[in-house]
Amino acid sequence: MKKLLTTPKSLYDGFAKAVELLKEGDNGVHYWKLVNTNGNIWAIVLGRTDDDYIAVKVAFQPNNSIMQCDYSVDWLLPYDKASGEVEDCEWVLYDTDEPSKVLDDVLKNWNENKTRYLEMTA
């Protein structure tokens, strides 16, 4: 099992606070940048889906995007250009979910798949 990089407590605190804001009715999108490659910004993105669920995903914003406000449109899941297959790296947060545990899963996914994801947008 790979050891995750040490993550600042502030990321966990900020993530938990953003989840609470969304539960209270905030409709914004919260994101934490992971890396910027070839003009594509990769981030942990938290917001509301089109079905009004609170969800988090590892996603990228293409270098030709001028928006940063729509969870479903401006932040794209990684996908294989040849096959069109989209990676499933999105988690819905239910009321019983502990935000820190969900964030652990997101960071684990990023650490395990980072190289492959970045190759998809190279």
Image (cartoon, helix red, strand yellow):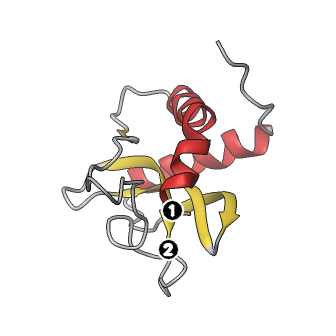
Along the viewing direction, whichever of 101 and 89 lies nearer the viewer = 89
Which class describes the residues within 10 Å of circle 1: few (<14), some (14-19), or many (20+)? Answer: some
Q: Residue furthest front?
A: 82
Residue topped by disc 2: 62
In this view, the mark in front (2 or 1): 1
Q: Which corner quadrant holds the N terminus?
A: top right
Amino acid at circle 2: Pro
Q: Secondary structure at mark 2?
A: loop
Along the viewing direction, whichever of 81 and 34 lies nearer the viewer = 81
Q: 2 above or below 31?
A: above
Q: Position of residue 43 (x, y in %)?
A: 58, 57
Residue 110, by quadrant, is: top right
Count of marks placed on residues? 2
Q: Position of residue 62 (x, y in %)?
A: 49, 74
Q: 98 above or below 91?
A: above
Which class describes the residues within 10 Å of circle 2: few (<14), some (14-19), or many (20+)? Answer: some
Badges 2 and 1: C-beta atoms under 8 Å apart?
Answer: yes
Amino acid at circle 1: Thr
Q: Secondary structure at mark 1?
A: loop
Q: Residue at x 52, y 48 (%)?
A: 117
Q: Which mark is residue 107?
A: none
Q: Residue at x 63, y 34 (%)?
A: 111
Q: Position of residue 27 (x, y in %)?
A: 38, 67
Residue topped by disc 1: 121
- Spatial separation of the CA atoms under disc 2 and disc 1: 8 Å
Q: Residue furthest top?
A: 1
Q: Which corner quadrant holds the C terminus?
A: bottom right
Q: Earlier in the sequence, mark 2 or mark 1?
A: 2
Q: Is residue 66 left or right of residue 9?
A: left
Q: Residue at x 24, y 56 (%)?
A: 52
Q: Position of residue 80 (x, y in %)?
A: 36, 53
